[in-house]
Amino acid sequence: MTAEGEALVGGMANAGAVVRRGALVERPAPRNAPALHTYLVALKAHGFDAAPLPVGLTEDGRERLTFIPGDVPLPPFPDWAMTTTALESVGSLLRRLHETSAAVEVDTRAGWSVDLADPEGGTMLCHNDVCPENVVFRDGRAAALIDFDLAAPGRPLWDVAMTARYWVPLVDPASAAAFYPSGLDAPARLRILADSYGLSPRDRTELFAVVEQVTEACRAFVTRRVADGDPVYVRALAERGGWDRWDRMQTWLAERRKTFTAALLT
């Protein structure tokens, strides 16, 4: 720890801009920070203790949040982060978040992020970015969620599908090999996530269609960032196989729709 603080690594949008100062984390504030801070405080008031609490905003446009100790898996993701136990704990934690979030009134004037938001909207806030880099683990189990910058009103099933995309993962083997341990059984892991979340029979029949929606939304998000000349996304696209990779992922998903749906319903 230096006088300037300890730089925290991980993620793409705020890479190099997140600093820990003792018990606090300082990072760029999203434009809807006041509403997002109100939401995080309300989660805590309703009993959800697995998210950072806001401390305040600085004059130079940064936010201060409580630091949550633990281990955050970074790519290439370690074996311990992809165990069945880890996956089950992610599903359970997401269910806890949704049950609490459903009790928190949504501020409809807040200007929530549209980047990865559910196009059908909803009456509760979804996290929308439960990727490994945004989950804090302790003793091999998911203990907290961080980085709520992309939170927006949506269906719980949208959040489950987005989480499945990152944690199963629901990408073709060539894409998965760059970041995930080998030998992951994707259909079985999708079933484990659904079971640990407590997904209803009806939602299981609909989940894979929403996964395909989510994948389209993620591609559109990258398209916008690249079109805007965002150097982080331009570089990542080039390094990860360009648009051919996205074509391959989406074809792979479409070809395995029946396999994944059967795994969910068996």
Image (spheres, rainbow, N blue to C red):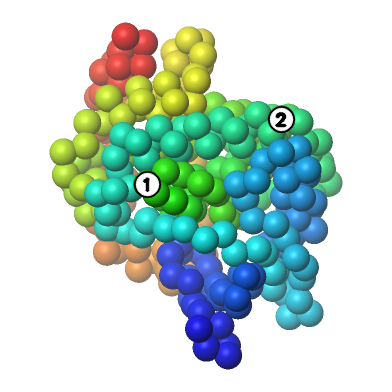
On residue 128, the disc is none
Q: On screen, 22 above or below 2?
A: above
Q: Is residue 263 visible?
A: yes
Q: On screen, 255 above or below 62?
A: above
Q: Quadrant of the C terminus?
A: top left
Of residues 171 and 136, the one nearer the viewer is 136
Cα gap from disc 2 to disc 1, whole angstroms: 27 Å
Residue 91, how many percent across, how many down? Answer: 46, 32
Residue carrying label 2: 102
Q: Residues within 10 Å of mark 2 (few under 14, many from 20)?
A: some
Name the residue type under label 1.
Answer: Gly
Q: Secondary structure at mark 1?
A: loop
Q: On screen, 26 above or below 121?
A: below
The mark nearer the N terminus, 2 or 1, is 2
Identify the residue at horizontal 37%, vertical 40% (top origin). Answer: 86
Residue carrying label 1: 140
Q: Please tell me whether mark 2 or mark 1 is closer to you in this view.
A: 1
> On the picture, is 104 further left or further right than 150?
right
Of residues 107 and 231, the one nearer the viewer is 107
Name the residue type under label 2.
Answer: Ala
Residue 118, how many percent across, how many down? Answer: 59, 35
Residue positioned most to the front: 139
Residue 95 image-quadrant placement:
top right
Q: Secondary structure at mark 2?
A: loop
Of residues 154 and 57, the one nearer the viewer is 57
Q: Is residue 250 visible?
A: no
